[in-house]
């Protein structure tokens, strides 16, 4: 189809090809053939008439007949149509949505006096309280920053009246006939649809022009903001009889529930429906110090291990001072434990700050912790106070288990590093250690006497699945002849698939200078291009910034004391370093002993302690063979602390607090949110009876309700595809509440009972989705501007709503329709053809043709 716009009109000529359904080429050749045949006939007739009439008459007849043929072809083949566009005004509607989430219930008392006075005047809050002229004088004085008038009781009474208006009340005042009467003005021009929304939408009453919508109709409880909801309502309204001319949303713009509304924004933009925002929050965010997120890493630890608590703070409009973050620990034996405290200076600028605190978890079971943030101003007389002290605290739960971490230590010989390492771990009651030493020169007998004598084994276990049962494997100075290809492949499977932690400990014989040439070990190593370094004066072990935030490197509960201890530890005279691989993390570097320590974290020097993720697991490379030097005058204090903390960290994802001699089970974490997946794990010990392949194992979930509980679901467990004796399962979308998990194994009830004969129970908590509705109380203008720009809408302050009113009053809803005139049915085109035929007949008569 061809379209040709006709000049000086709103019409267009459309040519519809008759045989277009046959395809482009077939259609073209049929037209060419038809036109050629008819023109050939006309030309033959022209040649014949040249013999009987004059050349002039013959040429005129040729032109007239060609025009007749072209006209007929135009009508028969092109089927021309003249299309006229017509527009008419139709009934219109305007969709108005009011945000009724919890943040819209905030009273912004921190607004400036000028901002308060402007809102009081624009929303007519002053009427009946002060004369209009008095309010105008106050406004002019506020613009000049002349606040002498603020001492009057009349002024204070008016501000107290304004302080009763939360954000949503100001929005309703705009709609109310006692205020701006926005709805009444719009109803003169458009049909109004008014909704309130938070996570869901519901209509508000507008029964007659000027009526007041009822806030009481909105639901109560925790309500978060989903800006996708009013946009979806607007899209559904376009199917009604009245045409939608726009969407007006009264909100602070904080979208914190569900997916992003951008897809709906694009849909409205494609439909040509603008989205306007009336900003209901203050120009500056309220003074607020808030803990917006907190998590423990790991969420479950072994007893006497360190847990890293990461706390993210939001600081808005607070005066310069000091921010103090405290982590309160549970009492120990009925006595209070000193909190972990960290402070940092605040310069007065709005910011987000992440703080890490390390806490030693000494009590087994579920530990309830409390994070608290506090602002200490430099000037105590500063009037800006925290407007939302409730969000300065956040509870946290960490599971602490008294279970033992299973570790395998392998070395080629009993060198100093191996000797002191095994000695320290043997004294640790929380460790279950196995040892393998290939070269034991004083041993004259075979392998079996080594077990009886308590000596290390002479070779690695032969069971292909044996390595998968360990939480941590420490490899010392081994060569390729001792660590065969089969075991290297098993180690890779242990790290990548099982998710285990492998520690590679440097040695002067093979590790890593010779063994790294193997492609498997080369992939596992966090460094490349290894090189030996030595120093007669010694080199210091300097912790990096990343290492400071790593729990197993903390030598003291106090961060400053831990840093001093690392500086005082004996130096090392030999090491193997290299280039850290992309994605790896350097936790410590080796620097010259005479290099002064300026108190900053080391970012220069040779990588000496490096960590990297590999598959589901982790690999740590330690490039020295002399951690035993840390025992100088201190015994096992620092050497044992380093290794025990490292092993507990490696096994942290295996910590489960509920169990007996046969099985341990529970959730990976003590607390979950409703939008998170809850993962259940059951791990059987060596004492447990081997279950048959078709054995049913499951978790029975009980939801606690006061003093009673009820079974809400039973979840089957399945064997882990890699880790032996481990069964897992997961479930999502559990409602918020307190739950108890019970392990169910039909026919093996004695395996899931405590020593008192009761069923083993593992509690966990499901919390509502952490959206932060009352955490960030600032206005997200950029988000609203982005939506308005994409749809062609406007963003106005609540005191400037008159601008939006005037704009919306001028909007019209029009319906465009098209009328078509087929030229083949047109009387004037028929007259044109008859006229051509008449002219042709008359010329023939003048020329003397019959």
Image (cartoon, rainbow, N blue to C red):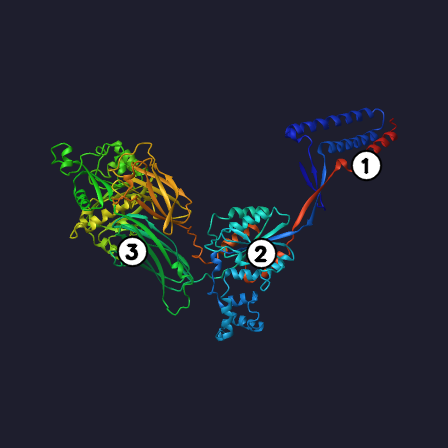
Q: CA distance from mark 1 to mark 2?
A: 63 Å
Name the quarter where the C terminus is drawn: top right
Relative height, residue 319 to residue 693 (above, below): below
**Is residue 605 among what the camera can see?**
no
Q: CA distance from mark 1 to mark 3?
A: 103 Å
Of circles 1 and 3, the one toward us is 3
The residue at which mark 1 appears reads as 831
Q: Secondary structure at mark 2?
A: loop
| Image position of 271 (left or right of 346) | right
Query: Residue 847's mark?
Result: none
Residue at point 51% right, 59% down?
Answer: 168
Question: Which badge, 3 or 2, is on the more N-terminal residue?
Answer: 2
Splitting the image into 4 quarters, where does residue 746 fall?
A: top left
Of residues 688 and 521, the one drawn nearer to the viewer in this rendering? 688
Residue at point 82% right, 25% down?
Answer: 49
Of residues 527 and 738, the one drawn nearer to the viewer in this rendering? 738
The residue at which mark 3 appears reads as 330
Of residues 371 and 646, the one drawn nearer to the viewer in this rendering? 371
Mark 2 burial class by Cα count in 10 Å: few <14, some 14-19, many 20+:
some
From the top left corner, tell me how far across and down residue 676 is, in percent. Answer: 40, 46
Mark 3 burial class by Cα count in 10 Å: few <14, some 14-19, many 20+:
many
Question: Which badge, 1 or 3, is on the more N-terminal residue?
Answer: 3
Q: CA distance from mark 3 to mark 2?
A: 51 Å
| Image position of 391 (left or right of 545) | right
**Is residue 606 among what the camera can see?**
yes
Of circles 3 and 2, the one toward us is 2
The answer to whether the residues at label 1 and label 3 have Cβ atoms under 8 Å apart is no
Q: Secondary structure at mark 3?
A: loop
Name the quarter where the N terminus is drawn: top right
Query: Residue 205's mark?
Result: 2
């Amino acid at each position: 189809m061809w379209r040709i716009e006709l000049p000086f009109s709103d019409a267009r000529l459309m040519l519809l090809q008759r045989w277009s359904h046959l395809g482009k080429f077939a259609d073209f050749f049929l037209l060419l053939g038809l036109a050629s045949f008819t023109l050939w006939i006309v030309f033959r007739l022209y040649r014949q008439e040249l013999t009987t009439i004059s050349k002039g008459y013959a040429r005129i007849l040729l032109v007239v007949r060609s025009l007749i043929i072209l006209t007929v072809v135009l009508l028969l083949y092109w089927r021309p149509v003249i299309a006229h566009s017509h527009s008419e005004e139709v009934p219109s509607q305007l969709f108005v949505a009011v945000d009724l989430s919890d943040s819209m219930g905030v009273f912004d008392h921190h607004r400036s006096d000028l901002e308060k006075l402007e809102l009081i005047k624009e929303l007519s809050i002053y009427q009946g309280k002060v004369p209009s002229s008095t309010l105008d004088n106050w406004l002019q004085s506020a613009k000049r920053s002349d606040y002498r008038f603020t001492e009057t009781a009349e002024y204070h009474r008016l501000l107290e009246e304004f302080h009763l208006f939360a954000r949503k009340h100001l929005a309703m005042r705009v709609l109310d006939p006692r205020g701006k009467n926005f709805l009444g003005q719009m109803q003169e021009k458009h049909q109004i649809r008014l909704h309130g929304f938070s996570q869901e939408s519901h209509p508000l009453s507008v029964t007659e022009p000027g009526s007041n919508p009822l806030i009481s109709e909105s639901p109560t409880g925790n309500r978060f903001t989903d800006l996708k909801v009013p946009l979806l309502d607007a899209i559904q309204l376009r199917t009604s009889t009245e045409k939608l001319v726009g969407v007006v949303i009264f909100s602070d713009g904080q979208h914190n529930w569900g997916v992003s509304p951008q897809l709906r924004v694009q849909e409205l933009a494609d439909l040509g429906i603008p989205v306007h925002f009336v900003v209901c929050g203050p120009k500056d965010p309220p003074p607020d110090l808030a803990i917006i997120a907190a998590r423990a890493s790991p969420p479950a630890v072994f007893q006497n291990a360190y847990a890293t608590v990461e706390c993210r703070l939001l600081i808005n409009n607070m005066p310069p001072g000091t921010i103090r973050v405290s982590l309160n620990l549970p009492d120990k034996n009925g006595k209070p434990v000193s909190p972990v405290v960290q402070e940092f200076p605040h310069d007065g600028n709005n910011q987000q700050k992440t703080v890490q605190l390390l806490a030693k978890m000494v009590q087994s079971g579920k530990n309830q912790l409390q994070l608290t943030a506090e602002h200490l101003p430099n000037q105590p007389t500063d009037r800006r106070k925290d407007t939302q002290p409730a969000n300065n605290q956040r509870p946290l739960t960490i599971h602490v288990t008294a279970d033992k971490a299973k570790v395998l230590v392998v070395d080629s010989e009993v060198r100093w590093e191996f000797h002191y390492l095994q000695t320290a771990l043997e004294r640790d009651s929380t460790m279950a250690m196995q040892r393998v030493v290939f070269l034991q020169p004083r041993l004259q007998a075979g392998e079996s006497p080594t077990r009886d004598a308590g000596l290390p084994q002479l070779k690695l276990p032969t069971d292909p699945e044996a390595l998968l049962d360990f939480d941590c494997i420490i490899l010392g100075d081994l060569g390729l002849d001792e660590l065969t290809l089969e075991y290297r492949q098993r180690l890779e499977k242990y790290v990548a698939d099982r998710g285990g932690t492998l520690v590679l400990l440097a040695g002067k014989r093979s590790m890593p200078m010779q063994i790294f040439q193997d492609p498997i070990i080369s992939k596992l190593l966090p460094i490349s291009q290894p090189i030996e370094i030595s120093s007669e004066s010694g080199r210091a072990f300097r912790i990096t910034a990343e290492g400071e935030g790593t729990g197993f490197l903390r030598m003291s509960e106090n961060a400053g004391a831990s840093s001093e201890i690392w500086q005082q530890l004996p130096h090392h005279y030999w090491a193997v370093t290299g280039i850290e691989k992309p994605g790896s993390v350097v936790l410590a570097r080796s620097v010259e002993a005479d290099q002064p320590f300026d108190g900053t974290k080391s970012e220069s020097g040779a990588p000496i302690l490096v960590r990297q993720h590999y598959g589901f697991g982790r690999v740590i490379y330690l490039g020295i063979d002399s951690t035993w030097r840390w025992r100088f005058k201190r015994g096992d204090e620092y050497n044992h602390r380093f290794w025990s903390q490292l092993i507990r960290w490696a096994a942290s994802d295996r910590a489960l607090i509920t169990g007996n001699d046969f099985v341990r089970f529970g959730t990976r974490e003590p607390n979950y949110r409703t939008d998170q997946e809850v993962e259940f794990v059951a791990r059987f010990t060596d004492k447990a009876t081997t279950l048959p392949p078709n054995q049913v194992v499951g978790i029975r979930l009980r939801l606690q309700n006061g003093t009673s509980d009820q079974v809400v679901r039973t979840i089957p467990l399945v064997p882990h595809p890699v880790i032996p004796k481990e069964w897992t399962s997961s479930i999502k979308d559990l409602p918020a509440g307190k739950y108890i998990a019970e392990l169910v194994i039909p026919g093996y009830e004695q395996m899931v009972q405590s020593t008192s004969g009761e069923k083993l129970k593992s509690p966990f908590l499901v919390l509502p989705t952490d959206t932060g509705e009352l955490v960030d109380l600032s206005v997200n203008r950029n988000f609203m501007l982005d939506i308005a720009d994409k749809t062609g809408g406007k963003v106005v302050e609540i005191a400037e709503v008159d601008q939006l009113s005037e704009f919306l009053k001028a909007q019209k809803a029009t319906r465009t329709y098209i009328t078509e005139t087929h030229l083949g049915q047109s009387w004037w085109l028929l007259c044109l053809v008859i006229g051509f035929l008449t002219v042709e007949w008359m010329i023939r008569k003048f020329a003397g043709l019959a």
